[in-house]
Image (tube, grey):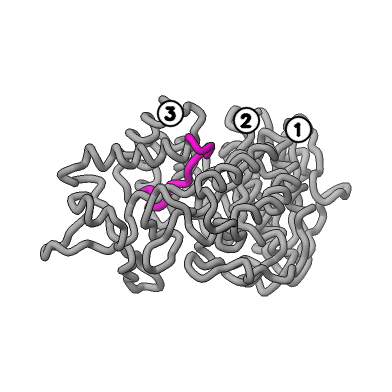
Amino acid sequence: MAEGPRIYNLFPLLAGPFPAWQPHLERAARMHFNWIFVNPVQPPGQSGSLYSIRDYYGVNPLLLDPPGGDAQAQLGRAVRSAHDLGMQIMIDLVINHTAVDSPLVAEHPEWYERDAAGQIVHPGAHADGQLVVWVDLASIDNATSADRENLWQYWLRVVLHYAALGFDGFRCDAAYQVPAELWRFLIHSARREFPGLRFFAETLGCTTEQTLEVARSGFDFIFNSSKWWDFSAPWCLEQYRQTSPVVPSVSFPESHDTERLAAELGGNHAAVRQRTAFAALFASGWMIPVGFEYGFRKRLHVVNTRPSDWEQPSWDDTDFIGWVNALKKGHRLWNEDGPMESLDTASSHIVALRKMTRDGAQRGLLLLNKDPYQARSLNLPSIETLLGARFALAWPQTAEATALPPAGFQVFASSDAQ
């Protein structure tokens, strides 16, 4: 059985220098994660943002201990530590822009986008209806640069450098803003030397059509938008139906780009656990950032977060997340973006998602109570009828589903769903 990626995001600014990563890696392994994702570790530009990369071959001084040590050796040891614990590791690949004060701006001015006055273009995005321009960033002209061949070869050398250090994959930042032709070139070329490399496309904020265009460029996974689903609106399952035949996806209950879920849900532990189970079982893969298991509430910040921001845990869900990952690992059903449908429950509070493997051989059922305050009764046919087979109750360990507690959930799978 091919296991989907179970990803633990080790946010470097919170984890601290490389030697301090070890207990976080060990905890991720105990929770049965099989991938580590680290945000950019390169030196940032003048803003200090992780995503404002000044030097693609350097290492952020904040991550070095001792400070004067061999930077590449320290990074390499951290990568090997993940491997020694049985996990693969990926790093961010940011090729849509660089820091505005990167030496590349002076060395290769033809690589950058320019406005009518010949000035560097700064990328931006809409937030709350307003355009936010990141003046610390300089947009790369990957599509029409007069020196496109050398630019693309530069990016390939960056990919090969980190693959040679031992990285097994790349989370490709703002993938839809990079030409699909460039992605095909990078992925195909890099795999000639490192056949096992995996590429994950960050496609949040783009249309389904843009997502599909990126997916067809050779990516192994995309990140889906199920984190924002209210369990009712049709858009989420419709997106899933369009993308799942093309490329598998990765869900997440929170990320470094969002508020902490525990804060969003007002500390409702049951609701956090419900979203955890949903994210893990919805798609082939899933991801959480460091601290999620403890109910951290302070949002991760790409400039200001430091190890001193480590919080007093609101709870310890390491065992629970370990159980979720073990459930996912043990059933092919939960490792595929197979067909999924929402069943009519005759209740505005109860959601029933029936999922099956792509070959239709195995089925599962995820029941969710959207009401965070009251238990809600179920009005469904027998689970055996819904699954068309004998079933095993995976959570909680009770005999039959008759009601769900506030923000509760239950998971069923056909008994042969291995």
Q: Is residue 166 magenta?
A: yes
Residue 304 vs residue 279: left or right? left
Q: Does the magenta stretch include residue 119?
A: no
Could you say which quadrant of the image residue 407 lies in?
bottom right
Q: For mark 1, what is the residue?
A: 389
Q: How far apart are marks 3 and 1 (CA)?
A: 42 Å
Q: For mark 2, what is the residue?
A: 2
In this view, the residue in front, 263 or 115, is 115
Quadrant where the image shows the N terminus: top right
Residue 26 vs residue 14: left or right? right
Circle 3 SS class: helix
- Checking the image for residue 191, the label placed there is 3
Circle 1 SS class: loop
User: Which amino acid type is marked by label 3?
Assistant: Arg
In this view, the residue in front, 32 or 88, is 88
In this view, the residue in front, 318 or 370, is 318
